[in-house]
Image (cartoon, rainbow, N blue to C red):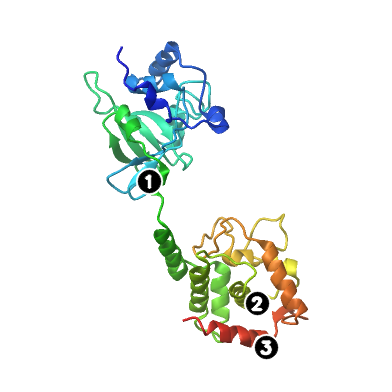
Amino acid sequence: MTKIFSESFFDDFWCEDDYTYRDYTGEPLRKEQVQQAEETLGYKLPPSYIELLENKNGGVPNNLCFPTKKKTSWAEDHIQISAIHGINKKDYSLLGSLGSRFMQDEWGYPDIGIVICDSPSAGHDAVMLDYRQCKNGGEPAVIHVDVEVGDEPEITYLADNFESFVRGLVNESVYEPTAEEEMQELLNQIATGSFSPVLLKAFETAQNTMPDAGQKLRRLAKEIVMTKQVFALHEDDLSYLMYDYLFWLFCHVRRPQSMRDYLWPDKDKPMSYDTPYYALMVALSDGQDHYEFHTAYTGGYCRDFLKTWWQVRQESGELIETPEGFTLSQDTTKKMFDALANYQ
């Protein structure tokens, strides 16, 4: 039988790593496995799909993206897969515990074909073989299906057949933004991104002293981004000014009783705005209140820089302890106000 793919086609097609073999790649494909899959799922598999699995029985391609002519839930002009399912003993195989039937029964994928590729969304969208128009021995089309965008699954046509889909896969690097695009996106985030609940409460409490507290914060963040090309805080003058300003704002929510009380009172407890702390202003989200105005290191921040700021300010007498808790000295507060006025 004439081969659909040349031997050289697979020279650089598959990603070879432990993750691929652990979760997706099984033993060499056998004819009885194909027969079992077709009988169980009720559809005849495309020859190109079978030939692909004969080369590797499930796995992760090096090229994971497929161009689209319309916006999808994944991106403006493409979708992305995580792997191509094989017919083997893995959970993610066509007949596995997390395979096609599971996706249809548990996630609500339409009963119009077979789920053949999962995606980075972990179940919210996937790629299917669509057999609705498959007649007279023809092959199923390939579609992208999103089950989380509305009451009904959203279906996007990808290719006439599996061979065209596989040949059309492109590398993620094709869609990587340029440095200019990344910078513009960051500046937009700084200019319009939503603030955390801690900051919003601080702005409200501090409005008599500083009615434009939010805009001052945005302008200072923009200066940091223009200087560093990233919204990150370290041991430099701009970072220390940001630390000063964030602490001043925080004191309008509550006065910290110690450095630990300000940084993170109890790391063993879940994050909560009931007793806010620094990280919930610009570094972390509690999983419910997702805000867009945050520093670069999503999921955490460098606590040591903030510890050093606290120690420097306390040793110099700029951060003072009072019966109500710690606060900035009057001279330090005035210097901070003067410095913030420089950024328009």
Q: Which mark is residue 251?
A: 2
Q: Which mark is residue 308?
A: none
Which amino acid type is shown beneath numbered disc 2?
Answer: Cys
Front position in the image: 312 or 104:
312
**Residue farthest along the left direction in this orientation:** 136
What secondary structure is marked by label 3? Answer: helix
Front position in the image: 225 or 262:
225
Is 274 positioned to the left or the right of 49 in the image?
A: right
Above or below, 279 against 39 in this view is below
Q: Which mark is residue 174?
A: 1
Which amino acid type is shown beneath numbered disc 3?
Answer: Asp
Is 180 positioned to the left or the right of 4 in the image?
A: right
Mark 2 or mark 3, earlier in chain: 2
Instruction: Kindly report which numbered mark, 3 or 1, lies closer to the viewer in this rendering.
Output: 1
Residue 198, visible in the rendered structure:
yes
Front position in the image: 308 or 129:
308
Q: Position of residue 96 (x, y in %)?
A: 50, 25
x 36%, y 36%: residue: 169
Q: Give me the C-alpha separation between circle 1 and circle 2.
A: 46 Å
User: How dense is the environment of label 1, judged by Cα within 10 Å: few (below 14), some, or many (20 and up)?
Assistant: few
What secondary structure is marked by label 1? Answer: helix
What secondary structure is marked by label 2? Answer: loop
Is 54 positioned to the left or the right of 165 in the image?
A: right
Which amino acid type is shown beneath numbered disc 1?
Answer: Val
Mark 3 or mark 1, earlier in chain: 1
x 72%, y 63%: residue: 265
